[in-house]
Image: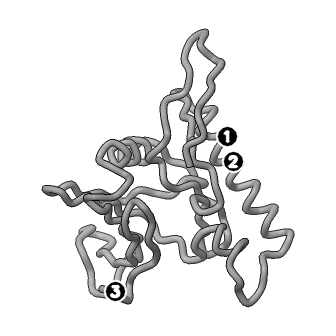
Amino acid sequence: RPDSLLGEGGFGYVFKGWIDEHTMTAAKPGSGLVVAVKKLKPEGFQGHKEWLTEVNYLGQLHHPNLVKLIGYCLEGESRLLVNEFMPKGSLENHLFRRGPQPLSWALRIKVAIGAARGLSFLHDAKSQVIYRDFKASNILLDADFNAKLSDFGLAKAGPTGDRTHVSTQVMG
């Protein structure tokens, strides 16, 4: 439904949806658990490899400052990700779009600390992860303005053993 469109990017579209909390099947709008459904454009910039990377990382990693992957769908050319719904949207929207009121400094600090905790978790994990797409549009905010990192399509495994110096090109 067009009225459920939350956003659009090179990857595709993000829609607001609802699922039954017990069966995890689609529910009528307004009932059940609210989710964000990311639908990739078959011709989009983000291909199957990035989609698979996101499924793999978010399917394995769990932390209060990472967006929660609820499910995914791969059917023919269709690729969907079902994530927890983040009602306050992206940090980018709060910083760069004219809204009724800018974020207070206390909230900005809270968001920065939350995003830093998410990155720290990735870097300190047993199998380290290099996020590679840290930007305001990928920091999503829940109802209490808790920051959660999203969009793991560019993430990659961190260094192992004595290969601890890593350089990466700018990606996003």
Q: Are marks 2 and 3 in contact (CB under 8 Å)?
A: no
Q: Secondary structure at mark 1?
A: helix
Label 1 to label 2, Cα distance in Å? 5 Å
Name the residue nearer the viewer: 146 or 42.
Answer: 42
Q: Is residue 56 above or below residue 168?
A: below
- Left or right: 31 with respect to 107? left
Label 2 to label 3, Cα distance in Å? 35 Å
Residue 75 in percent (x, y) is at 15, 57
Q: Secondary structure at mark 2?
A: helix
Q: Which of the two discs, 1 and 3, labels the residue nearer the N terminus?
A: 3
Q: Which residue is mark 1?
A: 120
- Residue depicted at 38% across the width and 42% down the height: 53
The amino acid at mark 2 is: Arg
Which residue is outermost to the top?
A: 162
Q: Are marks 1 and 2 in contact (CB under 8 Å)?
A: yes
Q: Is residue 166 above or below residue 154?
A: above
The amino acid at mark 3 is: Pro
- Residue depicted at 28% across the width and 58% down the height: 43
Q: Which residue is mark 2?
A: 117
The amino acid at mark 1 is: Ser
Q: Is residue 120 above or below residue 78?
A: above
**Disc 2 versus disc 3: nearer the observer:** 3
Name the residue nearer the viewer: 124 or 170.
Answer: 170
Residue 28 in percent (x, y) is at 27, 86
Residue 1 in percent (x, y) is at 30, 86
- Left or right: 144 with respect to 160? right
Label 1 to label 3, Cα distance in Å? 37 Å
Q: Which residue is mark 3?
A: 2
Q: Are there few (<14), some (14-19), or many (20+) residues within 10 Å of tag 2? A: some
Which residue is outermost to the right?
A: 105
Q: Is residue 53 above or below residue 30?
A: above
Residue 99 in percent (x, y) is at 70, 86
